[in-house]
Image: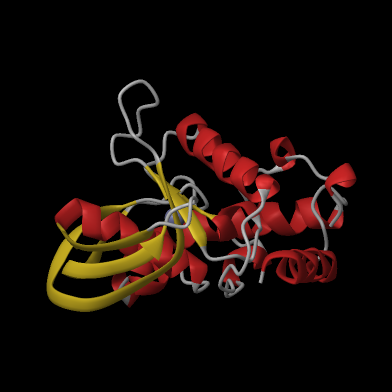
Amino acid sequence: MSDSEFTPGQLKVITYPHPGLRHIAKPIKRVDATLKRIAARMIELMYQHRGVGLAATQVNLPIRMFVWDPTGNPEKGQPAVYLNPTITRPRSNEEAEEGCLSIPGVNSNVVRAKTIHLHAFDIQGREIDTDLSGYEARIRQHETDHLDGVLFIDRLSPAQIRDHDNELAILETEFQSRQRMGELPTDDQVKEELLAWERRYC
Ligand SMILES: [Zn+2]
């Protein structure tokens, strides 16, 4: 992937059932100017879509990075970038409603650890080592799940999934027809693109 053919402005939020959402992202081994611009573009997309977090896999990049701002407000918020996050020490459970920019129109309660420990690096390479709870812990778990190819709908009970069968089927049909029309890349094209990014950063 050469810089002459790529600009971060081309990145878009991909939606279910795009195969990029199921790709397991790899740890980032190098940070360059383009990666910093990608992070800035992800923050811009997160605000545009009124989200509070966005993982690299959601813009079809197979690298372990997510951005977040719990306020979702570009005027007031302080967006942060997390590289190579790992979550440990999950303690007790809590249920709360979640949605996802990659699964528009679907919201449901998800059980997650109430408190976690998060280790990561920021875009400057500084270490982040912190205990989190509640909403702050929840968003980080949702975004780290994305980097493992896991979506919040995977964590729903069969009864909850049944409630959303229709919406998910509509997204699937729409995606497949856009793929057939050539408006979206084929699964093989997606795979090739992901490999090029892995060679560059992982
Ligand atoms: Zn999500």
Residue at 30%, 72% in the rendered image: 159
Q: In this view, does 37 lie above or below 196?
A: above
In percent of width and height, residue 155 lies at 34, 72
Residue 112 sits in quarter: bottom left
Query: Residue placed farthest to the left in the image?
Result: 92
Give the vertical position of 4 relative to 55 (above or below).
above
The quadrant of the image that shows the C terminus is bottom right
From the viewer's perspective, is 143 left or right of 136? right
Q: Nearer the viewer, residue 71 or 2?
A: 2
Rendering coords of residue 71 (x, y %)? 29, 34
Residue 77 x, y percent position in the rendering: 32, 30
In the image, residue 11 above or below residue 153? above
Quadrant housing residue 27: bottom right
Residue at 65% in and 59% down: 61
Indicate the quadrant of ligand 1 in the picture: bottom left
| Lateral position of residue 90 relative to residue 33, left or right | left
Marker count (numbered): 0
Q: Which residue lies furthest to the top in this view?
A: 75
Looking at the rendering, which quadrant does residue 96 occupy? bottom left
Figure quadrant of the N terminus: bottom right
Give left or right: position of 104 versus 180: left
- Is residue 151 among the parts visible in the rendering? no
Residue at screen point 48% across, 39% down: 46
